[in-house]
Image (cartoon, rainbow, N blue to C red):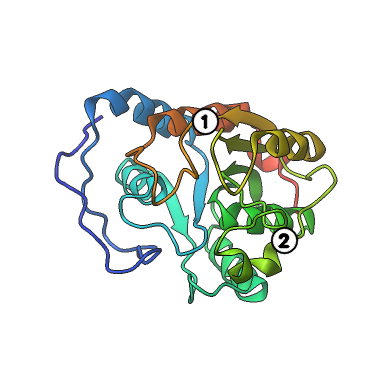
Amino acid sequence: MPFPSAPMAPYPHAGDLPCHAPFRPVAVPPDCARAVRRLVHALAGFDVLIVPGLDGSLPHHWQSRWTHILRQNGIGVHRVRQRDWARPTYRMWTQTLRRTLGQARDRPVIIVAHSLGAALSVRMAAARELENVAGAFLVALADVAPYRGADRHRVAEFAALPTGRLPIPAMMVAGHDDAWLSLPRARSLSHAWGATLRDAGRVGHIGNQSAIGPWPDGMDMLADFATSLPADHEDSLETV
């Protein structure tokens, strides 16, 4: 499987990676090649829906890198493009996610969400507002209610999180030094939701400010999650 060596071109705004624009080949470091091959194999039969969080995902963000890498290896990738990444409203973001999900009709979807996008996705899943979703991969979920950082007023509408078991499989990825989500809280939420919890180590909020590159550890986690989903995806899908 070839891995082109041209660099990824920048995009002008956070979260502004066109959903169906021709991708530019992305350099895959040699130590990531194995993780990429494994992830591409695990995602065969699925589409991926990328759901960025507050302020979107910049071109160096792992979500943006994965978008390019997966597309150039034949995986169907859809990406939520919010009208306003800086001033989110729950209603607007919900509508955009639902509309983007509607573009994926041929294969069951794995949601790959970060931060506020993960909070949005899990709330919509619990409320049964999503369709054709095989599972949700939730990275560094933004636990808005206890958060006391400078951005708390921008995200107040997203504070309420589900308290019961989710109707779809989920994997949560959380670290030891994330200002938005403590590891004990992640353990509590994952237990309540029936989700698998994976420890990302000390990588901050795993977002625009994290120097993790294409994040091969995350690729392995997503590959594990995709492989764990029922073999007969279409027959086992639950409308949520």
Number of other residues with Cα within 10 Å of mark 2, as a class: few under 14, some 14 to 19, many 20 or more: some
Quadrant including the C terminus = bottom right
Q: Residue at x 44, y 48 (%)?
A: 207
Residue 112, image x and y in percent?
53, 47
What residue occupies the far right of the structure in this picture? 164
Q: Judge by depth and name the residue closer to the eye, 132 or 8.
A: 8
Location of residue 106 in the rendering, given as x and y in whole percent from the top left corner: 54, 53
Q: Label 2 belongs to which residue?
A: 159
Question: In the figure, is residue 191 to the left or right of 18?
Answer: right
Query: In the image, what residue occupies the spot 23% across and 59% down?
Result: 10
- In-image side of 26 versus 51 (left or right): left
Q: Nearer the viewer, residue 14 or 147?
A: 147
Instruction: Give the residue drawn at x 37%, y 64%.
Output: 14
Give, as a three-letter code, the residue at label 1. Ala
Residue 195 in view (yes/no) = no
Percent x, y of residue 6: 14, 45
Residue under label 1:
200
Q: In this view, does 93 lie above or below 65?
A: below
Looking at the rendered structure, the secondary structure element under dot 2 is: loop
The answer to which image quadrant residue 134 occupies is: top right
User: Considering the numbered disc 1 on the image, is that residue within a helix, a strand or a loop?
Assistant: loop
The N terminus: image quadrant: top left
Q: Distance between the residues labelled 2 and 1?
A: 23 Å
Question: Where is residue 71 shown, x and y percent of the image?
Answer: 35, 48
Q: Residue type at mark 2?
A: Ala
Crowd tier of the residue under label 1, counting other residues whose Cα lies within 10 Å: few below 14, some 14–19, many 20 or above? many
Give above or below for 79 relative to 1: below
